[in-house]
Structures are given as structure tokens and as C-alpha cells.
């Protein structure tokens, strides 16, 4: 078993006035190397919270997250920041690109931050731009690109520093159907070719066919959508709570 991410009994609550609101209750699952996992659920179900904990930008109340053999939930803030810079690439809904920079400069940012040799960084950024089909737009300011093109620049940037894990939060929410599909298909192809593991949070049913697996967050827990071989009418399998079975131990519907 080659699990890149293992989440065990993760709990997270937020303070609401004098009480606490529980968002994640004993969430357990694992993700295999090279998998493209989609995380869905209604607004407020905790998708961004879960992704933020995986991205080492938010801490959990209890439970453990192991990524690439490291127990990141026990890291110091400095160790988390280093792990984030080296091992994780992020894609956001609104791109978070630098508008004053061109596409090439944007893709190079993570490499510049890591002190990469300039010629090497430039080569890697150009190669990635070609692979997201934007070789001819490398020197365009991002404000002169379409929304779909901007998201493809953001995808190239997420892969630039060669992270092992890519986390995407609503990457198609600002795009129309075709641009959204193209961007996600590009992300998935790049991740497959480069051996990356991806978790994509989405509301967008139109891109679900691109998932290797779909997990649904609801009522603080996770349900796994049936795999492709299941009859279409079968309901998602609700994992038991509070002793929810880890999906890693289950049949983890491969598709
Ligand atoms: N900093 C915070 N303080 C208090 N409550 C918070 C905080 N951040 C999120 N929440 C609450 O936690 C719950 C989960 O929020 P989260 O952003 O993870 O949901 P989501 O599934 O990503 O929603 P959406 O699909 O709308 O982006 C929500 O009820 C939200 O109001
Ligand atoms: Mg969210």
C-alpha cells in the first residue's frame, strides 16, 4: 500500500461565541500516490477547513495527518512552513496570481522563493507553460489572459517546485463549463504524468467524471461515493461515527 496521505480521527471545531462548533468529527481517510481525489459537500460542510489542515495552514484540535511518511500534525510552525513550500502545490478559485507579472514570471515564483538557479527556473516554467498549452502566452501579463488561461497558469505554478501533493480549492468555480473541464483535465494529466497526488475540493458536478475517487463531507464525517462498477442507484456508503472506519482499511472504490 503506497499511501501518500493518511488522516486519522481528525477533529476540528471553531469558537462561536462562548461555544464551539464542531466542523470535522473523527475524519479518517487515506490517499494513494498518484490518485486524484475529489472532495465534495454542501457549503459550510468543512471542505476548506480539511484542505487547510492538509495544507499545513490550519491546525486540528485532535487526530493525526501523515503525509509522505511525516506526521505533519506534530510539526512546529517552521517545519510546517518548510513542508508546505517544498512538498505542496496550491491551486485556488481566484488564481492568486501577481497581476504585475507575466505568465512566465508567475509560474517561476515558487522556484525563485526556493532559490532555484534562474536559468533552470525559467526552463521549468516554460516547460510547464507549454504543457498547459500556453507556450505562446508566456510573456503576457496575466490581466491579458482569459479566466481559463489564468487558471492554467496557476496550475503550472502549483507544479513548478515539483511538489508531491497538489491541493486545489474550487479551482473551476470562476470558469465556464468548457474552461473548467479543460483546466481540471490539465491538472489531472499533469499530476498523472509527474506522479503527483491531488485533492480537489469542488461544488462543480460537471467535473466529477475526472475524479479517481469522490469523498463527500457531511455532518462532520465522510462518505465515499460508490466506484464506477457500482449500480448507479446505490447510495453513498456512510462510514460509521464516532468510530468511523478509515477508508484506507475499506474497499476504497478504485475507478
Ligand atoms: N475562522 C472561522 N471561525 C469560525 N467558524 C468558521 C471559520 N472558518 C470556517 N468556519 C465555519 O466552519 C464551517 C466550515 O467552513 P468551510 O469554509 O470549511 O466550509 P466549506 O465546505 O469550504 O464551504 P464552501 O463550500 O462554502 O466553501 C462553516 O460553518 C463556517 O462558517
Ligand atoms: Mg470552501
Image (cartoon, grey):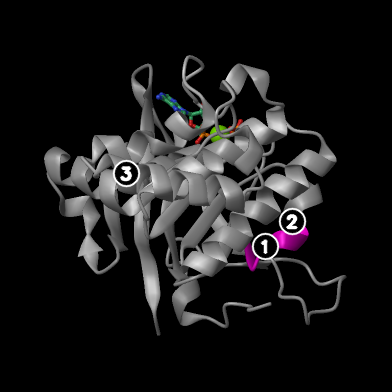
Which residue: 45% across, 50% down? 159
For this view, does 209 lie left or right of residue 31? right
Q: In the structure shown, which secondary structural element does the residue marked by tag 3 occupy?
A: helix
Tell me: residue 188, above or below residue 217: below
User: Label 1: which residue?
Assistant: 211
Which of the 4 image quarters holds residue 163? bottom left
Instruction: State which quarter of the image contains the N terminus.
Output: bottom left
Residue marked by disc 2:
208
Foreground pick, 63 / 248: 248
Q: Looking at the image, is mark 1 or mark 3 earlier in the sequence?
A: 3
Residue 159 drawn above or below residue 29: above
Total numbered badges shown on the rendered structure: 3
For image coordinates 71% across by 75% down, the residue present is 227
The circle on residue 119 is: 3
Q: Secondary structure at mark 2?
A: helix
* Label 2 Cα neighbours within 10 Å, binned few <14 / some 14-19 / many ≥20: some
Q: Residue 88, how many percent across, how many down?
A: 36, 50
Which corner quadrant holds the C terminus? bottom right
Q: CA distance from mark 2 to mark 1?
A: 5 Å
Taking the image as shown, residue 129 lies to the left or right of residue 231, namely left
User: CA gap, disc 2 to disc 3?
Assistant: 38 Å
Amino acid at each position: 500500500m503506497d499511501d501518500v496521505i493518511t488522516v486519522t480521527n481528525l477533529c476540528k471545531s471553531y469558537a462561536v461565541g462562548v461555544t464551539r462548533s464542531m466542523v470535522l468529527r473523527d475524519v479518517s481517510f487515506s490517499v494513494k500516490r498518484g490518485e486524484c481525489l475529489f472532495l465534495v459537500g454542501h457549503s459550510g460542510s468543512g471542505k476548506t477547513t480539511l484542505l487547510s489542515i492538509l495544507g499545513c495552514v490550519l491546525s486540528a484540535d485532535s487526530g493525526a495527518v501523515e503525509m509522505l511518511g511525516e506526521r505533519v500534525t506534530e510539526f512546529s510552525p517552521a517545519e510546517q512552513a518548510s513542508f508546505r513550500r517544498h512538498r505542496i502545490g496550491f491551486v485556488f478559485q481566484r488564481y492568486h496570481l501577481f497581476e504585475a507579472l507575466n505568465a512566465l514570471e508567475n509560474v517561476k515564483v515558487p522556484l525563485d522563493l526556493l532559490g532555484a538557479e534562474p536559468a533552470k527556473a525559467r526552463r521549468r516554467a516554460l516547460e510547464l507553460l507549454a504543457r498547459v498549452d500556453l507556450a505562446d502566452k508566456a510573456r503576457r501579463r496575466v490581466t491579458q489572459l482569459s479566466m481559463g488561461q489564468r487558471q492554467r497558469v496557476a496550475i503550472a505554478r502549483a507544479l513548478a517546485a515539483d511538489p508531491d501533493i497538489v491541493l486545489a480549492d474550487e479551482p473551476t468555480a470562476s470558469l465556464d463549463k468548457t474552461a473548467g473541464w479543460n483546466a481540471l483535465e490539465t491538472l489531472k494529466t499533469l499530476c498523472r504524468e509527474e506522479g503527483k497526488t491531488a485533492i480537489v475540493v469542488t461544488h462543480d458536478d460537471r467535473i466529477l467524471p475526472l475524479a479517481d475517487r469522490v469523498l463527500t463531507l457531511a455532518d462532520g464525517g465522510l462518505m465515499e461515493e460508490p466506484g464506477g462498477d457500482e449500480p448507479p442507484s446505490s447510495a453513498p456508503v456512510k462510514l460509521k461515527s464516532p468510530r468511523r472506519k478509515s477508508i484506507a482499511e475499506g474497499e476504497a472504490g478504485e475507478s
